[in-house]
């Protein structure tokens, strides 16, 4: 950090010229408007294989003569650097999981995954994940992206130039050009991949605490949600379910029969997610430790001894996920574990966090042995991808254990490209207003870094939320891509009903709004799985040419059609054009003190479902279509449907329906439903159309027809 100014000064005087290396690693185009730049001293053994990319790109040709975004490489102060100059008035975004404002100009960030309680360590300039990626939006609305393909400890400075400074060897850089930020995001997805289609239940509301125990308390929480008719899909189990915090075990006192607990939850329409950390208790007779020791899977010290560090169970050893044998061993542990009826897995503490280690992790000179694909090297190289390697092995094990179900994994630590394996949350935030407000740019920028399935702990993890704070947080939290309330063991209870009837009602309304939106949300997740577009988007995505909305970080968008404006937003800058406020469950957000305004874009058709208490009772057989006509009295929309779990959709068992609305007859809006693709059949599918007018929403009757008329005046 102390050398940042000197590094930036040195980089600013470098001449920007592309450099060439061997024929295999030569600067040039790897796809249309995607260039790769190699430093002169690039060493593939120190950099490859790439963790970010899905496959090694093939060179397609030389850089065009008019290519104007080049990379200057240098070495100084023991750091390998890459610098890209940017045009004046360029707005910079993304950089992964970071605190601060939506616009990243003028900031310096550290890429070194860190357990960071309340974001207080290093003033929050480094958190649990690393995404060495910057999205830039030019003054005219065109865009570019810069990806440093480097896992080593790194610093990223954003000023008149983009400057990556790494503690490792010289690294390559990818530069993407696009006609819009959306175009750049889709090109990024072509390099780093996209999320797999998640199970539908993972999009429902979720309730967590460190920890709910014993099993009777879990059942009490589940029963109370149903009694109070507050929709909820998932109850989470934190570390207190384990025996002495040993992973893959269950406390005989607190959870003597996990199969029965899960069966109870399933009967009530819930799923369960249980935590697994990487630290393995160093205890002879403990099967996980014994089997791992027998296979010699642990991370080593520089002296080639098993590294031991303290985490929740006390002295622990840590799997070395660079080795194929470790990956196979770890994956196999999930077979018997998932057989207890567990639905999802939570990989936490996987930076990895080590309580008595240097900088709260393991020493940088620890050794990872590697294997056929990954070379042996020090922890300084593999630290930032440790969590990514863990969740990849976890996912493979869960898929093998439950081959007919889509896995759900939540991870705290990850690296760019890790969205291929797991969803994420923004770690140990606090029950504070600034953390509520900061959660929006944090989540948006994670989406702009390739990770669409994310969200913060609703209510704040550390401390005690006031009723007012929790009410506002759940009201907006119902619209995060990942919607989960969570709090620490030291906090007071933070279930929706503990704050009094007013906040209980606020929570019920907010969550019911989310469940009505499930058809639209699920469609957005499917879109993201296909082309990498974020689910939660910045307002400027509505019009990248409008400079006035480039820094709006209070309001945000779900997809391209729905604008979310929090009640606490202070003079939010909203996009121009038609945006009509809509009501989903009878709420009037214009007079409500908590519920954000939901505004539907002119020219959009929004598919809505019924309010259900869990996705176990969800059906796409009855769909309401909200139509907001544009100036030409037309609108379009899309709905993706499948079974919500399993892999039948890969065999054509899905439905992609397109909706088109027009007023070809004066005073009548006609909506047509067309099957675009997919073979999914519905038993009794019916539609109802609601059209926004100056006098409120006007509805049609329910109809099985593929063409529905609505009298609008």
Image (spheres, rainbow, N blue to C red):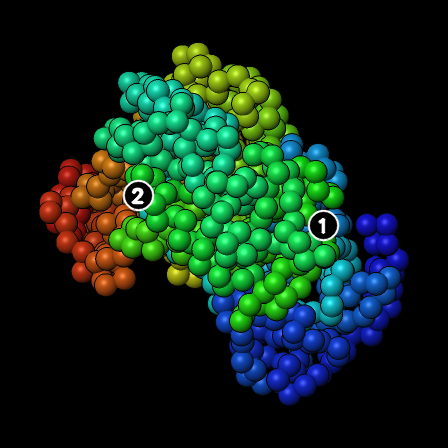
> Which residue corresponds to mark 2?
339
- For image coordinates 30% across by 51% down, the residue present is 402
Compared to 623, does 488 lie above or below?
above
The percent position of residue 551, horizontal first and vertical second, equals 63, 45
Q: Is residue 63 left or right of residue 123?
A: left
Residue most extreme to the top: 500
Compared to 631, does 532 lie above or below?
below
CA distance separating discs 2 and 1: 36 Å
- For image coordinates 67% across by 64% down, the residue present is 377
Residue most extreme to the front: 285
Q: What is the number of the mark on residue 363?
A: 1
Would you call the spot at circle 1 few (<14 residues within 10 Å), some (14-19), or many (20 or more)? some
Compared to 621, does 503 lie above or below?
above
Query: Residue 68 lies in what quarter of the image?
Result: bottom right
Would you call the spot at circle 2 few (<14 residues within 10 Å), some (14-19), or many (20 or more)? few
The percent position of residue 672, horizontal first and vertical second, equals 21, 53
Task: Determine whether label 2 and label 1 are within 8 Å by CB.
Answer: no
Residue most extreme to the bottom: 23
Q: Is residue 657 visible?
A: no
- Foreground residue among 656 and 696: 656
Viewport quadrant of the C terminus: top left
């Amino acid at each position: 950090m102390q050398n940042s100014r000197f590094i930036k000064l040195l980089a600013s005087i470098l001449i920007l010229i592309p450099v060439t290396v061997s024929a295999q690693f030569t600067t040039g185009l790897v796809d249309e408007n995607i260039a790769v730049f190699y430093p002169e001293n690039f060493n593939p053994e120190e950099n490859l294989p790439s963790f970010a990319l899905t496959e090694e790109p093939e060179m397609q040709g030389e850089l065009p003569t008019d290519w104007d975004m080049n990379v200057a490489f240098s070495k100084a102060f023991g750091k390998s650097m890459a610098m890209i100059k940017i045009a004046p008035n360029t707005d910079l975004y993304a950089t992964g999981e970071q605190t601060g404002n939506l616009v990243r100009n003028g900031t310096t960030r550290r890429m070194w995954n860190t357990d960071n309680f309340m974001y207080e360590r290093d003033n929050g300039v480094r958190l649990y994940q690393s995404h060495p990626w910057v999205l830039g939006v030019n003054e005219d609305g065109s865009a570019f992206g810069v990806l440093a393909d480097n896992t080593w400890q790194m610093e990223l400075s954003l000023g008149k130039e983009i400057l990556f400074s790494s503690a490792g060897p010289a690294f390559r850089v990818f530069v993407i050009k696009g006609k819009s930020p959306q175009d750049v995001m889709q090109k990024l997805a072509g390099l780093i991949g996209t999320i797999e289609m998640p199970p539908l239940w993972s999009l429902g509301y979720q309730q967590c605490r460190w920890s709910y125990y014993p099993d009777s308390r879990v059942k009490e929480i589940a029963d109370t949600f149903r009694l109070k008719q507050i929709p909820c899909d998932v109850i989470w189990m934190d570390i207190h379910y384990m025996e002495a915090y040993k992973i893959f075990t269950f406390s005989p006192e607190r959870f003597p029969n996990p199969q029965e607990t899960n069966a109870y939850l399933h009967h009530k329409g819930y799923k369960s997610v249980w935590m697994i950390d990487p630290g393995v208790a160093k205890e002879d007779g403990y099967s996980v430790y014994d089997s791992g020791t027998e296979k010699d899977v642990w991370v080593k010290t520089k002296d080639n001894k098993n590294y031991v560090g303290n985490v929740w169970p006390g002295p622990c050893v840590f799997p070395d996920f660079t080795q194929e044998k470790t990956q196979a061993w770890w994956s196999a542990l999930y077979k018997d574990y998932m057989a207890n009826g567990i639905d999802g897995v939570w990989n936490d503490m996987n930076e990895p966090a080590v309580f008595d280690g240097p900088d709260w992790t393991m020493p940088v000179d620890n050794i990872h042995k590697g294997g056929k694909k990954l070379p042996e090297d020090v922890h300084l190289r593999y630290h930032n991808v440790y969590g990514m390697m863990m969740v990849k092995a976890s996912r493979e094990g869960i898929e093998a254990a439950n081959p007919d179900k889509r896995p759900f994994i939540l991870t705290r630590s990850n690296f760019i490209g890790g969205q291929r394996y797991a969803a994420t949350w923004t770690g140990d935030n606090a029950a504070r207003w600034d953390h509520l407000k900061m959660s929006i740019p944090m989540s948006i920028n994670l989406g702009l870094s390739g990770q669409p399935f994310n969200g913060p702990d609703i209510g704040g993890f550390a401390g005690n939320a006031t009723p007012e704070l929790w009410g506002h947080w759940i009201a907006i939290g119902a619209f995060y891509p990942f919607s989960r309330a969570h709090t620490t063991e030291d906090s007071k209870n933070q279930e929706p009903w503990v704050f009094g009837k007013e906040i209980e009602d606020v929570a019920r309304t907010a969550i019911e709004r989310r469940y009505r939106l499930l058809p639209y949300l699920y469609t957005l997740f499917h879109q993201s799985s296909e082309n990498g577009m974020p689910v939660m988007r910045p307002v400027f995505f509505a019009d990248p040419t409008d400079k006035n909305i480039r820094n709006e970080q209070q309001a945000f968008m779900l997809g391209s059609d729905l604008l979310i404006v929090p009640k606490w937003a202070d003079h939010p800058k909203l996009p121009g054009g038609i945006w009509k406020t809509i009501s989903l469950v009878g709420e009037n957000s214009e007079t409500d003190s908590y519920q954000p305004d939901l505004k539907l874009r002119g020219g959009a058709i929004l598919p809505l479902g019924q309010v259900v208490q869990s996705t176990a009772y969800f059906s796409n057989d009855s769909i309401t279509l909200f139509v907001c006509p544009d100036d030409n009295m037309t609108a379009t929309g899309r709905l993706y449907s499948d079974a919500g779990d399993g892999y039948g959709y890969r065999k054509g068992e899905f439905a992609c329906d397109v909706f088109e609305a027009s007023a070809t007859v004066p005073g009548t809006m006609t909506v047509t439903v067309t099957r675009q693709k997919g073979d999914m059949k519905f038993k009794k599918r019916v539609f109802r159309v609601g059209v926004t007018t100056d006098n409120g929403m006007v509805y049609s009757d329910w109809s099985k027809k593929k063409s529905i008329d609505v009298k609008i005046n």
